[in-house]
Amino acid sequence: MGCAKFTEKIPHRSETNIAMATNHLLEIKQYGQSIWMDNLSRDIIQSGELKNLVENQGICGITSNPAIFEKAIAGNVIYDADIEAGVRAGLPTYKIYESLAFADIRNACDILRPVYDASDRLDGYVSIEVPPTIAHDTEATINEARRYFQEVGRENLMIKIPGTAAGLPAVEQVIAEGINVNVTLLFSVQSYINTAAAHIRGLEKRASEGKDISKVASVASFFLSRIDSNIDGKIDGKLKKGVDDIAIEAKLKAVKGKVAIANAKIAYQEYKKIIESDNWQALATKGAKVQRLLWASTSTKDPNYNDVMYVDELIGPDTVNTLPPATISACADHCNVANRIETGIQEAYNLIDNLKDPDININIDTVMEELLTEGIDKFVQPFQSLMNSLEGKVKLLSPV
């Protein structure tokens, strides 16, 4: 069984219900890109929806994060029995959270295991993130990655580690220990290059110890829509102040909604250089698998933009796109599938360079730093909110 298996659709009520006759997700696989889903909850596991998505509708993997778990667990009675069991066992709130999350992750891994086996470990992964509160603590990240991997106990688990300055040494170490890694919150091309280097160093260390490197998998999660949202906001601010020259106004408007895709296409060019390097080729001869670029933050935030533009424009070999349920449905219905990852490359470089134009004057490095800081906050806040919500339930369910 693979993620592109085409069978008659199983009818389903959810928003991820896809008419198989027009399921463009299955076409994308033909271009060497895997579609993963950025969503996980006990509801979709127990209802059979996740199994249906994997077996019949082209979903090859799952990504999760603290915001997804908050949405899944907070206020959902499906978890109450397990929360109550945790209370009776005297577990602290954080351990109750882990017991809920780990159970969902294990079940998802089991559902995706046939894809993992059929694809020779290319796909079939489920990602869980280490606590976002330790994003700047290398040793804590390493220790939690080890513990998560051991306690979940599934070969097709990926540990998500933020691509911060403290996170990358952790990536290197856990890769060396044979733990699959999803490096998350990558915004700048340089951050991706640094991530790829950490992946290579980890594999080199593992190989130097005579250990098998063929079973270690990694993806580099490169974020998209948040970049456009940030830059579009800056451009709208400039336009709102008023621009006297119509040519300057045209320059500013020409950048809107274009930077994220251009940035991703440049990152893919760097990926090609990396896999052609002597360092990588030496590892490849020992069976190493490439660290694929994974397009993340792919739901279109601006309603004026095409709702599948972060899918259509970035289809190409050796890539993954992780989509939230609404984008999965939209793409299955009306994605325009073609290999576009290497179209408009010179235009992409020009667009990024044009941000330095005094009439535009947007410092992309500053933008990327802002986004990384915001990205960590966007995971810390729902994580803390979830802990608070669980604490409330624990008190409610605790015996008097």
Image: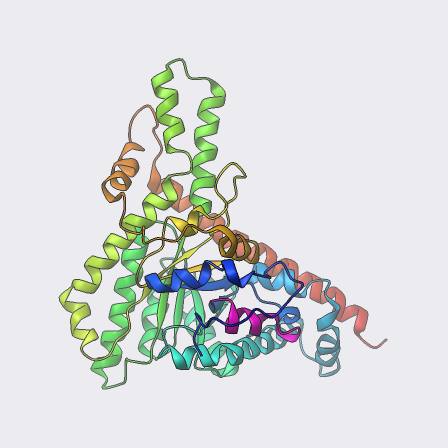
- Residue at 71% x, 72% y: name it: 79
Residue farthest toward the bottom in the current orientation of the protein: 210
Residue farthest toward the right in the current orientation of the protein: 400
Task: Tell whether 319 sits left or right of 124.
Answer: left
Q: Where is residue 253 in the image (x, y as percent from the top left)?
A: 40, 28
The correct choice, above or below, for 311 with respect to 8 in the image is above
What's the image's color scheme? rainbow
Q: Where is residue 149 in the image (x, y as percent from the top left)?
A: 46, 79
In depth, the one of 182 and 302 nearer the eye is 302
- Residue at 33% x, 61% y: name it: 31
Query: Is residue 162 visible to us here?
Result: no
Query: Is residue 143 visible to us here?
Result: yes
Residue 46 is a magenta residue: yes
Q: Quadrant of the N terminus?
A: bottom left
- Residue at 67% x, 63% y: name it: 13
What segment carries the magenta color?
45-58
Q: Where is residue 372 in the image (x, y as percent from the top left)?
A: 43, 50
| Total marks placed | 0
In depth, the one of 200 and 144 nearer the eye is 200
Quadrant in which residue 286 is drawn: bottom left
Residue 132 is a magenta residue: no
Residue farthest toward the left in the current orientation of the protein: 278
Quadrant in which residue 346 is drawn: top left
Quadrant in which residue 273 is drawn: bottom left
Q: Quadrant of the C terminus?
A: bottom right
Task: Tell whether 53 sits left or right of 120.
Answer: right
Dominant secondary-structure state across the stretch colored magenta? helix
Q: Where is residue 250 in the image (x, y as percent from the top left)?
A: 37, 23
